[in-house]
Image (cartoon, rainbow, N blue to C red):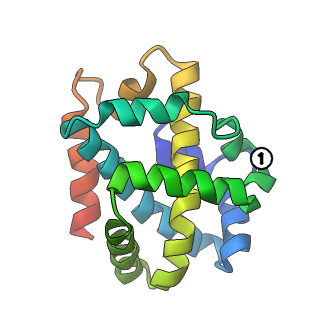
Amino acid sequence: MDLLRMIMSAQGGAVQQLSQRFGLDDGQTASALEHLVPALMGGMQQNVQSGGLEGLLGMFGRDTGNTDQFLDSADAIHAPETTDAGNNILGQLFGSKEVSRSVASRASANTGIGADILKQMLPVVATMVMSGMSKQQNSSQGGMFGMLDSNNDGSIADDVLGLAAKFLQR
């Protein structure tokens, strides 16, 4: 199952909880996720290509309050710890707040959702993405690379570049 579908079908009702927290309907939230998740995956790809693999792998090892629970607990979406963990993840993935703002602005242009709402949503979604990756890493032999290698060709570069290209074309 790909990461976006995992988040959309999370046991804790992630789409509904995000909708409630940010004052959106479920369709708007799904649209936001369709734009934000590929951008986050593109940030991961950038980290891998620029030698930031250690930092990415380190995020899996850090105790951010049991990362698996962020997708399974409806309450986690509303917890301040979720936003704090997400801001740390965004710092690692994007390196600056300007990049996060740019991601939110592009998603806003494509979804019609205000950039200010998407900026607030982005750290929560980042935490959910890492939670999903952590769950897949813990449940599969391929770990993070297995999840990123969606076509199972042994290389993640083409898969993550494809996600980033889809995002940038929108």
> Which residue in the rendered view is the most extreme toward the top?
141
The C terminus appears in which quarter of the rendering?
bottom left
Q: Position of residue 67 (x, y in %)?
A: 64, 38
Asked where in the image residue 166 lies, by quadrant, the reply is: bottom left
Q: Residue at x 50, y 62 (%)?
A: 33
Q: Residue at x 67, y 45 (%)?
A: 71
Instruction: Classify residue 4 as left or right of residue 16.
Output: left
Examine the rendered structure and indicate whether residue 72 appears above or below residue 36.
above
Examine the rendered structure and indicate whether residue 62 appears above or below residue 37.
above
Viewer-closest of 46 and 145: 46
Answer yes or no: is residue 38 visible: no
Viewer-closest of 40 and 19: 40
Query: Which residue is tagged 1?
Result: 73
Q: Residue at x 22, y 48 (%)?
A: 162
Examine the rendered structure and indicate whether residue 156 appears above or below residue 47.
above
Q: Amino acid at mark 1?
A: Ser
Viewer-closest of 96 and 12: 96
User: Label 1 neighbourhood size at 10 Å, few (<14), some (14-19), many (20+)?
Assistant: some
Determine the secondary structure under disc 1: loop
Q: Residue at x 49, y 69 (%)?
A: 32
Marks counted in the figure total: 1
Asked where in the image residue 145 lies, by quadrant, the reply is: top left
